[in-house]
Amino acid sequence: MSSSDIFISETIGTAVLILLGGGVCAAVTFKRSKAFNAGWVAIAFGWGFAVLTGAYIAAKSGANLNPAVTIGLAIKGGIEWSQVPVYFAGEMFGAMIGAVLVWIVYYGQFHAHLTDPEVLADHTSHEGLVDQATAPKAGPVLGIFSTGPEIRHAVQNLATEIIATVVLVLSILTLGLSDNGKGVGVIGTLLVALVVVGIGLSLGGPTGYAINPVRDLGPRIVHALLPLPNKGGSDWGYAWIPVVGPLIGGALAGGIYQVAFA
């Protein structure tokens, strides 16, 4: 498989992943959405279905869709290290495309939400209740694009992302590789999607479970660049945790697999 095949497959698959995952966050967030206030269970299942759809679309490249998965597979020997940068590039580009597509799909809702005096007043009131030294400089729609902690504690937040990512990547590595040697098979893809739902329900509460560096960083960059009124900051002070944590978790999962299962 050529580098261009990998890049195109990972770009499209990751774009669909973020479109559907960010889309469910938007659907639950906006008052002018049919799914407003549907809750955390809807988000967890929405992200699981997003993984399922993106993975089936990107089956040609093994459907990594996540640098943490790519790292784990490279340590296991499922892909060549020389291909890792190509996977990373496709995953990052796709994540940014997916975030832009969410904005397009919910364009009217973004404008209505960010110009709603009640929404802005609620956000201002909330920000006024927290310690300004540690308050996230984030706007009222940042959660549609990227993750953030409920309790801001760097060590705990990092540990949460590492542990959740180990669960994800280790489940992928132990499901068994498909015939092309680069990813799980058809049934395995469904099982991985269910694992993502389980992680969201069980481990997602503290940080929103990024478990994927590009899932967080790509859309956060898009949030910073889009012409959204009253959007606030993009919380760059926290942004390193959902990048570093999953990368460490992916590497740990690869190491655990080599020690315990290889």
Image: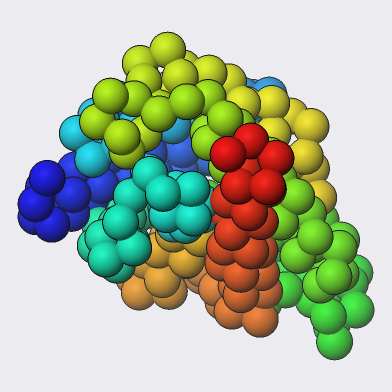
Q: Is residue 221 left or right of residue 113?
A: left
- The outermost residue toward the top is 187
Question: Foreground residue, 174 or 155?
Answer: 174
In the image, what residue occupies the spot 61% across and 75% down? 240
Q: Position of residue 82 (x, y in %)?
A: 27, 66
Location of residue 222 by image quarter = bottom left
Location of residue 148 by image quarter = bottom right
Q: Position of residue 106 (x, y in %)?
A: 36, 42
Q: Is residue 92 above or below residue 189?
A: below
In the image, what residue occupies the spot 19% across and 43% down? 9
In this rendering, the count of numbered labels is: 0
In the image, what residue occupies the spot 51% across and 60% down? 213
- Say which quadrant the N terminus sits in: top left
The answer to whether one can see residue 245 in this image is yes
Location of residue 153 by image quarter = bottom right
- Say which quadrant the C terminus sits in: top right
Question: Foreground residue, 167 or 14?
Answer: 167
The answer to whether one can see residue 40 in this image is no
In the image, what residue occupies the spot 9% across and 52% down? 2
Q: Position of residue 50 (x, y in %)?
A: 43, 30
Q: Position of residue 144 (x, y in %)?
A: 52, 50
Q: Is residue 124 left or right of residue 197?
A: right
Question: Foreground residue, 104 or 255?
Answer: 255
Question: Foreground residue, 185 or 235?
Answer: 185
Q: Is residue 68 above or below residue 126?
A: above
Which colour assignment does the render follow? rainbow
